[in-house]
Image (cartoon, rainbow, N blue to C red):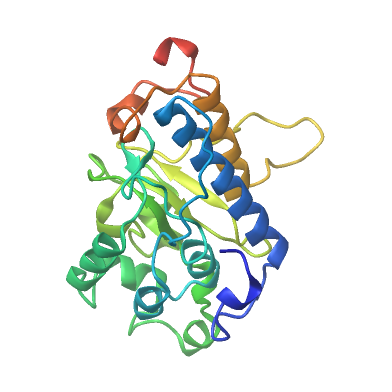
Amino acid sequence: MWEANKITPEYELKDWDAWKLLESLRAWDDFVTAIEVRVSGTAVLDPPNREPLVCEDMAKRWMNQSFQFAFLTNARRPRVSNLQVAPGVAVWTSELFEAMHVTESADSERKLSIGVKPSDSTFYQSHRSNDLAPTLLFPSNTTVSSSGASQLEDFCGRGSALFEHRPGLYLSPEDGWSDAVTFVDGKGRDKLFTYRNAWCPWMRTRPLDTLREVLSFWKMLVIDGIWSVDAQGVVGGMEYFDDFEDSRPSRSKV
């Protein structure tokens, strides 16, 4: 699923390169394999499923963000089609992906916050890049219980960029960081459960979390048994994160 010709011409590589995509895909494949090994209780010997998380035709209808398109149409679908990859967070199915986009209104708060409003200046309209818009990579089946607690709920002061006000793992790119992600929990907080959030003594600001790094951290939680796994994937709901005050779950939360 990682061949270059899987990325269609209309989604040209812009501020990201093939290395970021390939490393994210490798991290995803390793992470899913770790879950599947825990589910089966043995090494996965048969060739993995190569169906993508979202089929390309459907992605073309609903995706405007190039890294989201490239990742979701190349990342392999797990053997369990709606596998839960974190407490309360699952993968898209193509059916759910389309159903949610079909029902979203053209003037939804999310679309206006990440797109162009009639009141926007001509300069803003001509310089707005879809590749800097937050997009939901792995959704929760719940909605955020409070508002205003995350940057994505007031995206650039323009309103909520959360898709249907759902928690989950969002692609939240910035210039030079097209694979940056933000995890939003059930309370709408975006400072919890990043793979790192401590101050770094040799850097003025903490680097953004990237998709490949977060997936690698999630894999560690599965392999080390910090996250329990059953036939549907990682066990638990979004309430798992309610009491966390830092980024690393303790082993007492198994």
Compared with residue 214, is residue 133 higher up or lower down, i.e. above or below? Answer: below
Compared with residue 40, is residue 54 higher up or lower down, i.e. above or below? Answer: below
Classify residue 182 as left or right of residue 23: left
Q: Position of residue 178 (x, y in %)?
A: 61, 62
Count of numbered marks: 0
Residue 64 in view in this figure:
yes
Compared with residue 249, is residue 18 higher up or lower down, i.e. above or below? Answer: below
Q: Residue furthest top?
A: 252
Residue 210 in view in this figure:
no
Q: Residue at x 59, y 32 (%)?
A: 197
Q: Position of residue 180 (x, y in %)?
A: 58, 53
In which quadrant of the rendered image does the N terminus lie?
Answer: bottom right
Q: Residue at x 39, y 22 (%)?
A: 228
Classify residue 207 as left or right of residue 145: right
Q: Residue furthest front?
A: 46
Q: Position of residue 112 (x, y in %)?
A: 33, 73
Instruction: Kindly indicate the quadrant of the structure image that contains residue 159.
Output: bottom left
Q: Residue at x 57, y 76 (%)?
A: 7
Q: Position of residue 237 (x, y in %)?
A: 28, 31
Closer to us: 96 or 143: 96
Instruction: Kindly indicate the quadrant of the structure image that contains residue 36.
Output: top left
In which quadrant of the rendered image does the C terminus lie?
Answer: top left
Q: Residue at x 49, y 71 (%)?
A: 65
Classify residue 72 as left or right of residue 141: right
